[in-house]
Amino acid sequence: MNMVSPVQLLAMLATNVELTQAAGFIRRSGGRGHEDAPLYTAQVDVVGNSRVQVQPKIGPWHVRERVGVAYNQHVSTHLVVSASPSTQESSEAVRTLLDTYIERHAMGKQASENGFVVGVYGCPKQLGNRLHEFLNAFAVAVITDRTLVWQYTKQGNVGSLDYCDSLMHRQAWLPSAETIKDEYVHNFNWNYQPARMKEMACAELDDAGPKGHPVINLGVIEQYESFSLAADDAKLSTESKKRAKTLFALGPGFAFGSLSTRAFTLDGSISNSSQHSLQKLGFISGNRNHTAQELSIGMHIRTVGDQSKVSMFQQPLTDTMQTLGDRGCQVLLATDNDAIIDSIRQLVEARKCNLVVSEVDGTETSFSEEHGKHAGVGALRDVDLLSNADVLLLSCGSTFSEVIAEWTLAKNPGAVIQTVGCESEVTKPPQFTMAC
């Protein structure tokens, strides 16, 4: 069977070409009231004007499309991506798992039983790396049933605790590291060691007894290292393994996004500007619900000072916009290079779509020029803006791109994620081993 990507599926549906054995899910609505028919998991055959035939589930995506009154008409170009039934079930399981964890561990009330893990964060600069450092610890805490305690980063040029708190509010249930101020902390010092993921999977991190460590600090890990605990052969108890599989069932992207929303909320000063821009275009309603009138394409282009990298995104963006036929779209753009905005705008407006970028108040740089001129408040606004996307085109190797994907998936687990230039683990299923 030849598998197709979600974006390819959108293209096939929208352009009325012959579609065979495509991975996806279809919600079909017809008749005067456009009432939704039941959700179908689908291996789809569309030949000429023949009716859609539904076969067993193939992939994790669900494409909602509207056809005419007669079911044998070609598929319409109005396409909105949302979660399939199986994805919805898995996402609900994650939410239940996190609810249970927070109830048990809020403000350290269950602390003495299974030990602690220290989660270090910072903002608004170095947002991808600093959030991932914390979210890896949070994931380990949930899987091992340890109590998570927060600590502010000692990394330079990130932003003070007070500044960060004014922009990204820490949830009240989180206990601080003051809870363990008199305890010995075992620091694994994982950072960029090639074997760190295997070491983590095989370290028996849920052992807080005499052979283990009551209080642990994982080190400065900024990728998806905690995903290794979802390995089939990870050295964990049966219950911990079950929690790991549940947490990462939809991949580390949805897991980290769910953890982020349970730990932090953005201040209204961050979200209001992007929400206002989207409301003016009619993309979201006054209560901030997606109106689903047009497809939203989010795009984070990290040039690292090399403006030619924008060319890598032109074809994926064009392909995605072409799936819409005569329909419009919103393109939500974040970039480290303001100089590329006009060229992207021309491409977008030629397709009669709207380009939306975050409002900026001035220059706020990070420790490296490659992070662009808006690495502070602007970065948080970009995350909030692009989290409204149905389809994301992201930069290879960027933890900031991954954070955008995570917050998007937390809102819509069925969002389509495409990393331009490489494969990504954002939506990778937990089906692997680490040779423990």
Image (tube, rainbow, N blue to C red):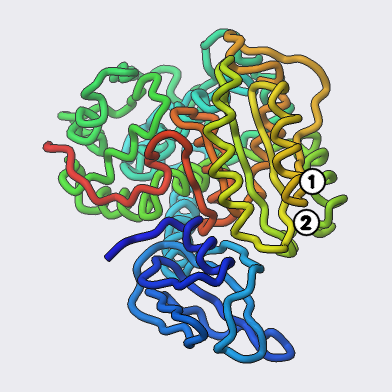
Residue 242, x across and y down, in percent? 28, 55
Between 294 and 18, the one lying in front of the other is 18
What residue do we see at 68% from left, 12% from top?
A: 365
Dot 1 or dot 2, earlier in sequence:
1
- Is the N terminus in the top left, top right, bottom left or bottom right quadrant? bottom left
Judged left or right of residue 282, residue 410 is left
What residue do we see at 77% from left, 56% from top?
A: 283
Between 133 and 365, the one lying in front of the other is 365
How many labels, in total?
2
Q: Is residue 367 above or below residue 238?
A: above
Query: Residue type at mark 1?
Result: Gln
Q: Is residue 402 above or below residue 157?
A: below
Residue 195, x across and y down, in percent? 21, 24
As helix, strand or loop, the secondary structure at mark 1 comes to helix
- Please say whether residue 106 is visible from this viewpoint: no
Disc 2 packing (10 Å; few <14; some 14–19; many ≥20): many
Query: Label 1, on which residue?
Result: 275
Query: Residue type at mark 2?
Result: Ile
Task: Report how far apart the C-alphas of labels 1 and 2 lie in the structure.
Answer: 8 Å
